[in-house]
Amino acid sequence: MKNIHGLIKIAMKKNLTIKETFDLAFKHHKKNDFKIAENLYKDILKLKPNHFDTIYLLGSLSIQTKDFSRAKQLLQKAIEINSNHADAHNNLGIAFGELREREKAIKCFENVIRIQPKNATAFNNLGTEYKNLKRFKEAVNFYQKAIDIKPNYAIVFRNLGLVFEALGELQKAKGYYEKAINAQPDDAESYNNLGVVFNEMGELQK
Protein backbone atom coordinates (compact mmCIF):
# COMPACT_ATOMS: atom_id res chain seq x y z
CA MET A 1 0.00 0.00 0.00
CA LYS A 2 2.86 2.38 0.84
CA ASN A 3 4.34 1.87 -2.65
CA ILE A 4 1.02 2.70 -4.34
CA HIS A 5 0.59 5.97 -2.47
CA GLY A 6 4.25 6.75 -3.05
CA LEU A 7 3.92 6.42 -6.80
CA ILE A 8 0.83 8.61 -6.88
CA LYS A 9 2.53 11.27 -4.76
CA ILE A 10 5.55 11.19 -7.08
CA ALA A 11 3.23 11.63 -10.07
CA MET A 12 1.54 14.59 -8.40
CA LYS A 13 4.84 16.19 -7.40
CA LYS A 14 6.13 15.94 -10.93
CA ASN A 15 2.96 17.64 -12.17
CA LEU A 16 2.42 14.99 -14.81
CA THR A 17 0.04 15.84 -17.59
CA ILE A 18 -3.13 13.80 -18.01
CA LYS A 19 -1.49 11.99 -20.93
CA GLU A 20 1.60 11.17 -18.87
CA THR A 21 -0.53 9.95 -15.97
CA PHE A 22 -2.63 7.88 -18.37
CA ASP A 23 0.46 6.33 -19.95
CA LEU A 24 1.78 5.44 -16.49
CA ALA A 25 -1.58 3.95 -15.48
CA PHE A 26 -1.79 1.91 -18.68
CA LYS A 27 1.76 0.65 -18.18
CA HIS A 28 0.85 -0.67 -14.73
CA HIS A 29 -2.46 -2.02 -16.03
CA LYS A 30 -0.63 -4.11 -18.66
CA LYS A 31 1.67 -5.44 -15.92
CA ASN A 32 -1.41 -6.44 -13.84
CA ASP A 33 -0.50 -3.89 -11.17
CA PHE A 34 -4.21 -3.27 -10.85
CA LYS A 35 -4.31 -1.19 -7.67
CA ILE A 36 -1.67 1.25 -8.89
CA ALA A 37 -3.38 1.55 -12.28
CA GLU A 38 -6.78 2.03 -10.65
CA ASN A 39 -5.59 4.88 -8.45
CA LEU A 40 -3.90 6.62 -11.36
CA TYR A 41 -7.03 6.24 -13.51
CA LYS A 42 -9.10 7.72 -10.66
CA ASP A 43 -6.70 10.69 -10.43
CA ILE A 44 -7.30 11.40 -14.11
CA LEU A 45 -11.08 11.29 -13.66
CA LYS A 46 -10.87 13.82 -10.84
CA LEU A 47 -9.38 16.26 -13.34
CA LYS A 48 -11.27 15.14 -16.44
CA PRO A 49 -14.44 13.18 -15.52
CA ASN A 50 -15.34 12.30 -19.13
CA HIS A 51 -11.93 11.05 -20.25
CA PHE A 52 -13.13 8.19 -22.46
CA ASP A 53 -10.01 6.01 -22.52
CA THR A 54 -9.69 6.16 -18.74
CA ILE A 55 -13.35 5.29 -18.14
CA TYR A 56 -13.16 2.42 -20.64
CA LEU A 57 -9.94 0.98 -19.21
CA LEU A 58 -11.04 1.37 -15.59
CA GLY A 59 -14.24 -0.48 -16.52
CA SER A 60 -12.20 -3.20 -18.21
CA LEU A 61 -9.89 -3.39 -15.19
CA SER A 62 -12.98 -3.83 -13.00
CA ILE A 63 -13.87 -6.94 -15.01
CA GLN A 64 -10.37 -8.27 -14.42
CA THR A 65 -10.76 -7.71 -10.66
CA LYS A 66 -14.30 -9.21 -10.79
CA ASP A 67 -16.05 -6.01 -9.70
CA PHE A 68 -18.75 -6.49 -12.33
CA SER A 69 -21.22 -3.94 -10.97
CA ARG A 70 -18.64 -1.17 -11.16
CA ALA A 71 -17.55 -2.41 -14.59
CA LYS A 72 -21.14 -2.16 -15.81
CA GLN A 73 -21.49 1.41 -14.52
CA LEU A 74 -18.20 2.58 -16.05
CA LEU A 75 -18.65 0.88 -19.41
CA GLN A 76 -22.17 2.23 -19.78
CA LYS A 77 -20.72 5.69 -19.23
CA ALA A 78 -17.97 4.99 -21.78
CA ILE A 79 -20.58 4.01 -24.38
CA GLU A 80 -22.56 7.20 -23.67
CA ILE A 81 -19.41 9.08 -24.68
CA ASN A 82 -18.51 6.88 -27.67
CA SER A 83 -21.32 4.62 -28.83
CA ASN A 84 -19.25 3.09 -31.66
CA HIS A 85 -16.48 1.60 -29.54
CA ALA A 86 -16.80 -2.14 -30.17
CA ASP A 87 -14.56 -3.24 -27.27
CA ALA A 88 -16.58 -1.17 -24.80
CA HIS A 89 -19.79 -2.90 -25.94
CA ASN A 90 -18.06 -6.29 -25.76
CA ASN A 91 -16.74 -5.73 -22.24
CA LEU A 92 -20.09 -4.39 -21.09
CA GLY A 93 -21.63 -7.59 -22.46
CA ILE A 94 -19.13 -9.62 -20.42
CA ALA A 95 -20.08 -7.66 -17.28
CA PHE A 96 -23.80 -8.21 -17.93
CA GLY A 97 -23.13 -11.89 -18.53
CA GLU A 98 -21.28 -12.26 -15.23
CA LEU A 99 -24.20 -10.51 -13.52
CA ARG A 100 -26.57 -12.97 -15.27
CA GLU A 101 -28.32 -10.19 -17.14
CA ARG A 102 -28.42 -12.37 -20.23
CA GLU A 103 -30.66 -10.36 -22.55
CA LYS A 104 -28.64 -7.20 -21.92
CA ALA A 105 -25.42 -9.11 -22.60
CA ILE A 106 -26.86 -10.37 -25.88
CA LYS A 107 -27.77 -6.83 -26.92
CA CYS A 108 -24.21 -5.68 -26.24
CA PHE A 109 -22.67 -8.43 -28.35
CA GLU A 110 -25.15 -7.66 -31.14
CA ASN A 111 -23.94 -4.06 -30.96
CA VAL A 112 -20.34 -5.26 -31.41
CA ILE A 113 -21.35 -7.16 -34.56
CA ARG A 114 -23.22 -4.12 -35.85
CA ILE A 115 -19.96 -2.15 -35.54
CA GLN A 116 -17.61 -4.99 -36.54
CA PRO A 117 -19.52 -7.65 -38.56
CA LYS A 118 -16.49 -9.99 -38.64
CA ASN A 119 -15.78 -9.96 -34.89
CA ALA A 120 -15.37 -13.67 -34.06
CA THR A 121 -15.11 -12.99 -30.32
CA ALA A 122 -18.54 -11.35 -30.27
CA PHE A 123 -20.11 -14.31 -32.10
CA ASN A 124 -18.49 -16.66 -29.56
CA ASN A 125 -19.79 -14.53 -26.68
CA LEU A 126 -23.28 -14.50 -28.22
CA GLY A 127 -23.15 -18.28 -28.49
CA THR A 128 -22.20 -18.55 -24.84
CA GLU A 129 -25.10 -16.38 -23.70
CA TYR A 130 -27.55 -18.51 -25.70
CA LYS A 131 -25.89 -21.64 -24.29
CA ASN A 132 -26.41 -20.26 -20.78
CA LEU A 133 -30.08 -19.71 -21.67
CA LYS A 134 -30.20 -23.36 -22.87
CA ARG A 135 -31.13 -22.14 -26.35
CA PHE A 136 -28.70 -24.59 -27.86
CA LYS A 137 -29.70 -24.36 -31.53
CA GLU A 138 -29.05 -20.61 -31.55
CA ALA A 139 -25.82 -21.12 -29.60
CA VAL A 140 -24.52 -23.58 -32.23
CA ASN A 141 -25.43 -21.13 -35.00
CA PHE A 142 -23.40 -18.30 -33.44
CA TYR A 143 -20.46 -20.57 -32.61
CA GLN A 144 -20.42 -21.73 -36.24
CA LYS A 145 -20.33 -18.10 -37.41
CA ALA A 146 -17.32 -17.52 -35.13
CA ILE A 147 -15.54 -20.51 -36.73
CA ASP A 148 -16.41 -19.28 -40.22
CA ILE A 149 -14.49 -16.09 -39.39
CA LYS A 150 -11.70 -17.73 -37.35
CA PRO A 151 -11.43 -21.39 -38.40
CA ASN A 152 -8.98 -22.56 -35.73
CA TYR A 153 -10.74 -20.96 -32.74
CA ALA A 154 -10.05 -23.38 -29.88
CA ILE A 155 -12.42 -21.89 -27.30
CA VAL A 156 -15.34 -22.10 -29.75
CA PHE A 157 -14.64 -25.79 -30.40
CA ARG A 158 -14.64 -26.33 -26.64
CA ASN A 159 -17.92 -24.42 -26.28
CA LEU A 160 -19.49 -26.51 -29.03
CA GLY A 161 -18.34 -29.58 -27.13
CA LEU A 162 -20.16 -28.29 -24.05
CA VAL A 163 -23.36 -27.72 -26.04
CA PHE A 164 -23.38 -31.20 -27.55
CA GLU A 165 -22.46 -32.77 -24.22
CA ALA A 166 -25.47 -30.98 -22.66
CA LEU A 167 -27.62 -32.35 -25.49
CA GLY A 168 -26.32 -35.88 -24.83
CA GLU A 169 -24.66 -36.05 -28.27
CA LEU A 170 -21.42 -37.45 -26.92
CA GLN A 171 -19.75 -38.36 -30.21
CA LYS A 172 -20.13 -34.77 -31.45
CA ALA A 173 -18.93 -33.42 -28.08
CA LYS A 174 -15.89 -35.72 -28.25
CA GLY A 175 -15.09 -34.51 -31.78
CA TYR A 176 -15.23 -30.84 -30.80
CA TYR A 177 -13.08 -31.32 -27.69
CA GLU A 178 -10.51 -33.09 -29.88
CA LYS A 179 -10.61 -30.17 -32.33
CA ALA A 180 -10.08 -27.75 -29.43
CA ILE A 181 -7.02 -29.72 -28.31
CA ASN A 182 -5.62 -29.85 -31.86
CA ALA A 183 -6.04 -26.09 -32.14
CA GLN A 184 -4.60 -25.42 -28.68
CA PRO A 185 -2.61 -28.38 -27.29
CA ASP A 186 -2.21 -26.81 -23.83
CA ASP A 187 -5.99 -26.36 -23.34
CA ALA A 188 -6.33 -28.18 -20.01
CA GLU A 189 -10.09 -27.62 -19.79
CA SER A 190 -10.71 -29.43 -23.07
CA TYR A 191 -8.61 -32.40 -21.96
CA ASN A 192 -10.67 -32.55 -18.78
CA ASN A 193 -13.96 -32.27 -20.69
CA LEU A 194 -12.84 -34.96 -23.14
CA GLY A 195 -12.05 -37.22 -20.20
CA VAL A 196 -15.54 -36.66 -18.80
CA VAL A 197 -17.08 -37.58 -22.18
CA PHE A 198 -15.01 -40.77 -22.42
CA ASN A 199 -16.20 -41.65 -18.93
CA GLU A 200 -19.83 -41.06 -19.92
CA MET A 201 -19.26 -43.25 -23.00
CA GLY A 202 -17.85 -46.02 -20.84
CA GLU A 203 -14.38 -45.77 -22.40
CA LEU A 204 -12.65 -45.67 -19.04
CA GLN A 205 -9.11 -46.37 -20.22
CA LYS A 206 -9.23 -43.39 -22.61
Image (cartoon, rainbow, N blue to C red):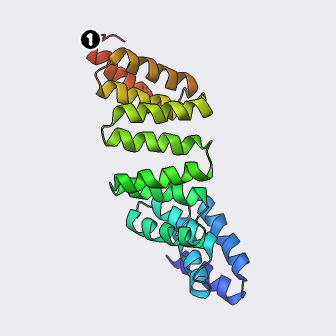
10 Å crowding of disc 1: few (<14), some (14-19), many (20+): few
Displayed quadrant of residue 174: top left
Percent from the top left, x then y, of residue 96? Answer: 39, 57
The residue under the point 45% across, 44% down is 126
Relative vertical location of residue 144 with respect to residue 11 in this rendering, above or below: above
Percent from the top left, x then y, of residue 157? Answer: 48, 28
**Which residue is under mark 1?**
202
Percent from the top left, x then y, of residue 168? Answer: 28, 21
Q: Secondary structure at mark 1?
A: loop
Relative vertical location of residue 17 with respect to residue 76 in this rendering, above or below: below
Residue 9 visible at all: yes
Relative vertical location of residue 177 with respect to residue 74 in this rendering, above or below: above
Relative vertical location of residue 109 with respect to residue 74 in this rendering, above or below: above
Displayed quadrant of residue 14: bottom right
For the C terminus, the image quarter is top left
Percent from the top left, x then y, of residue 20? Answer: 73, 76
Residue ranking furthest to the front: 114
The residue under the point 31% across, 42% down is 133
Name the residue type under label 1: Gly
Q: Is residue 140 left or right of residue 87?
A: left
The residue under the point 56% across, 72% down is 55
Residue 150 visible at all: no
Looking at the picture, tell me which residue is in the foreground, 119 or 159.
119
Looking at the picture, tell me which residue is in the foreground, 107 or 161.
107
Looking at the picture, tell me which residue is in the foreground, 28 or 26.
26
Q: Is residue 49 left or right of residue 189?
A: right
